Amino acid sequence: MPERSITPLIVVALLLGTLLALRSLNPSSVTTVPASSVPVLAPERVPLVTGDEPITEIFTKAGCSVCHTVPGVPGADGRVGPPLVLGITGPVRLADPAYHGHAKTVHDYVIESVLEPGLFVVPGYPTSTMPTWYGAKLSALAMEKIASYLEQQGVTAAQ
């Protein structure tokens, strides 16, 4: 039996299909969260995340699971921010005409989104909710681990 592999054509087809599916969403069908129910993370309550921790602990210590669903991280089932399956959604966001950041790769987009969350807010999610102080709480190693982990999420599901 021949070995199966993902060709560039399959990747493009999956990305286009995802983009079309996201664009076909009716904005009124997107659930918005009232500002009064948005959890607040205080910077003094978030410890410095060094990056020496296991990946699940990095997400937990940083508080990502309060607002986001993160595949593979127990208890990370937040609904305030978008699910972090950047292996699928990252390329779509980079191609979105509303995106005005500087990242060219999903990896760089993840880092940019954490350090400068206002550059692109996923439609249907609250603006000005993501803390802007993560650059002071996440080491460069922690950011690299987060970006490497998130850019892989959803990739195997799409294959």
Image: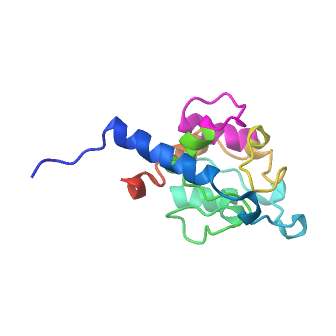
Quadrant of residue 100 in the image? top right
Going by the picture, which residue comes out furthest to the right? 36
- Residue at horizontal 54%, vertical 65%? 73
- Residue at horizontal 36%, vertical 43%? 10
Image spot of residue 21 (x, y percent):
56, 54
- Residue at horizontal 70%, vertical 67%? 79
Q: Where is 44 relative to 137, above or below? A: below
- Residue at horizontal 70%, vertical 59%? 26
Q: Nearer the viewer, residue 122 or 113?
A: 122
What colour scheme was applied to this rendering of the protein? rainbow
| Residue 120 placement, left or right of 6 | right
Q: Where is 77 relative to 99, above or below? A: below
Q: Where is 39 relative to 19, above or below? A: below
Image spot of residue 155 (x, y percent):
43, 51
Image spot of residue 77 (x, y percent):
63, 69
Image spot of residue 95 (x, y percent):
60, 35
In this figure, what is the number of numbered marks? 0
| Residue 145 placement, left or right of 27 | left
Q: Nearer the viewer, residue 79 or 60?
A: 79
131 in the magenta segment: no
Q: Nearer the viewer, residue 93 or 48?
A: 93
Quadrant of residue 36 in the image? bottom right
Residues shaded magenta: 95-116
